Image: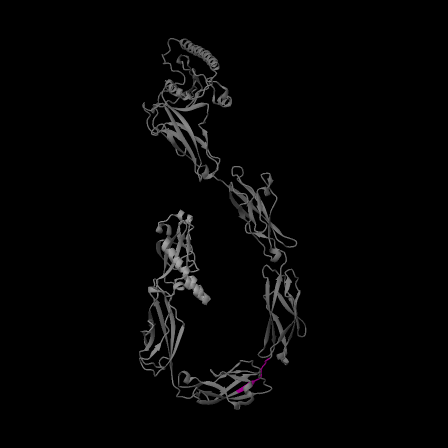
Amino acid sequence: MDVLCSHNARNTGSISRVCRRLVQFLVLFVFVLTVARGQVRYSIPEEMNKGSVVGNIVQDLGLDVKRLKSGRARIFTEDSREYIGLNVDKGTLVVRERIDREQLCAQVTPCSLHFQIILENPMELHQVDVEILDINDNAPVFTRREIGFQISESALPGAKFSLDSAHDPDVGLNALQRYTLNPTDHFSLKEVAGNDGLKYIEMVLQTLLDRENQEDHLLTLVAFDGGNPQKSGTVKITVTVMDANDNSPVFSLPVYRVSLLENSPKGTYVATVTATDKDKGTNAQVTYSFSQSTGKSLNLFNIDSETGEITVNGDLDFEKSKHFQITVEASDKGGLTDSSKVVIEVADINDNAPIISIISFSQAIPEDSAPETVIAMLNVKDLDSGKNGQVKCSIARDAPFKIKSTSTNFFSVVTDQLLDREKVSEYNITITATDEGSPSLSTSKILNIKISDVNDNAPVFQRQSYTAYVMENNTPGVSIFAVTASDKDSGNNARISYFLEDVLVNGVSASTYISVHAESGEILAVRSFDYEQTKEFNIRVKAQDGGNPPLSSNVSVKIIIQDQNDNAPQVLYPVQTGGSVVAEMVPRSADVGYLVTKVVAVDVDSGQNAWLSYKLQKATDRALFEVGAQNGEIRTVRQVTDKDAVKQKLTVVVEDNGQPSRSATVNINVAVADSFPEVLSEFTDFTHDKDYNDNLTFYLVLALAVVSFLFIVSIIAILSVKCYRWRRERMFYKSGANLPVIPYYPPLYADVGGTGTLQHVYNYEVCRTTDSRKSDLKYVRPSSESIISLDTSGTQTLTRAQRENLANDSEDQVRSENSETFFFRGPVFTD
């Protein structure tokens, strides 16, 4: 083959190029035989959008996406256009260009795109065929919109008339399928198969045509395809029935007499002559014309050849000619004629209207012009004589103008009152000049006067005040609101600029909070707002026009900061301390619904962001306690039993109603016991997990000092109690032996009520060490609180305020490993 191509190349260059293409084709064919590994076929509809997925070539060929990348996969097409592209990252074939099946394959079916996917290292070639499916995107189309036939009424039934065929570029069912013809009173439709295999249609006459009954027949030919939805094309068919000429025209009158005013303008109607022909169609068409015997009158009049209407074609003057006589002829298409005469009498009239000439005119005047300001000067004349030439001028009364006569035939237009451009910016003044003829003639002239603007209106805001809302924590520069003012003036007098007035907001200039766009009136935030610091403030915006001097107006704008849920709830009670264990005491005799304690929390936000709800997150025994969702009250759910543990730990979550919501948690220790030794023995475990100082000597000295102090306090308390009881006994003894015996009750004694709850309580303080023999108890003032505070400092018993003051120094205190001191505040029930 190389030898043959070389030999041919010596002869002609074109043969050489053919040989090279043949060699390339053979090389490619060998390449395909050696590396081709697979073939994939897809079917897609035409007109798919760019980027639409044709198929997953990786999945269909059993390849890997990494193989496409490593093999530098690409598409090879013999055609220069690449309708299908390869997405190497996803391993899919996508539509790169809009595919029109009709443009690509015309009527050829099936219509397919053939290309190869080539990979390297090792080299592979995969054949891909994409069949383009036809969609019904084309309707049948006729080459002409209308078809006309002229058929003689003598035509016999069975006569055939060929019709245009429709063309539909679609294929299959979407191609042209059938025709219909309506109506079918006189004609029917017949399909004829041609030698080329295509179908042609003919219109066949079914019945005789009668021109006298119906001269024109209108038919509609419709072509339908088989698509879904079905599409169609339409063509209109007009059939005109022809007739023969067998009658001549005849005028309705032998002489027509007309009276015409002098100086009638061109086109003035004079008369209409009428001739009739019993024939129809072209045989009955009559044309009218003037006879050449009319002479010079032919130049003054004109006749419509179709309608016979005679009109004035020149200037008529009674002084030159008082009457005219015209001969008119009527002819049909066959050359048959008839004639008639028209006699025209000319009458003298007032045929000259006044003429208005503008000498001077000011098209624009300022709106602050004073009355009697001259706007225009006019000259009015009439070519007639006598009364027909005497003229009067008038002007519309609803306009703020009037007309004055300065001298003969001269008039001036002046202002009659003050003008306001904002009410009426333009006037069309109609000036009418009327003569005194009978009948009188008049002429009108319209003067267009524009009122120029004067800056006499200040800008006006749409409302007297505005209220704008902005969410706190906003981005600086965000648009808050826009104020709009309008000015009735025009031009620069109505060009409005907006300014922020320098007022104080919280002691500083408003410009540190807000800025105003000079052209749009848009209010912008300069800083980020905090609702908890500033809830609202007022500013003033000034709108100023561009007049000289400028006019302005002010408006107040109230800026309201809207709250965001940017603060979590804060638990006020119970107070969480790191140096002591806080516990609430619940007696084992507590009924269902017993109030253990109440969680008190606040949220510095507002609105629903500050609506708090409480729920029990964790509890030692969930079946024993519940928390009120709205009030935070912790109550018992059931009766306390002996099986319930003394130590109960609750975790309550306080959550606000914001979006998103924020929450806080509080831990509450509850002691379930009827006696303090039981409580103390259990709660001593709370202190074992504390860190102790290694300085043992310091702890021993501190423990000894605490024990000595407690011993002295106990001795003093015992002596005080003994002295108090001795004085009471003395007073009772001296009261006399005859007094009735009254049982003695300790002070503040209270019996048990119907519910079993003791009404009177004592506050007590208990100091206890690990040695129960050195423990002591002291009664203090009554209180309704039921709080147990277990202080593990080991130094002394302190009140809440004292403990808070010493909280910062608690790190320097030393705890003893052998001595523990607890502090309880809670109710002591008298028996």
Q: Taking 738 as reference, is 616 above or below it? A: below
Q: Position of residue 222 (x, y in %)?
A: 35, 70
Q: Taking 539 as reference, is 425 above or below it? A: below
What residue range appears in magenta?
344-351
Q: Position of residue 56 (x, y in %)?
A: 37, 51
Q: Position of residue 129 (x, y in %)?
A: 36, 57
337 or 67: which is nearer to us? 67
Work out which residue is located at the far right of the displayed protein and give it. 407
Quarter of the figure that contains the C terminus: top left
Q: Position of residue 434 (x, y in %)?
A: 60, 75
Rendering quarter of residue 571: top left
Rendering quarter of residue 214: bottom left
- Say if the magenta span includes residue 348: yes
Quarter of the figure that contains the N terminus: bottom left
Work out which residue is located at the far bottom of the displayed protein and give it. 293
Q: Is residue 470 left or right of residue 790?
A: right
Q: Taking 220 as reference, is 585 above or below it? A: above
* Residue 99, visible in the rendered structure: no
Q: Taking 604 as reference, is 543 above or below it? A: below
Q: Is residue 673 left or right of residue 534?
A: left
* Residue 664, visible in the rendered structure: yes
119 or 769: which is nearer to us? 119
- Say if the magenta span includes residue 637: no
Q: How many numbered discs, if any?
A: 0
132 or 271: which is nearer to us? 132
Query: By what rule are the colours in the image chosen?
Result: one colour
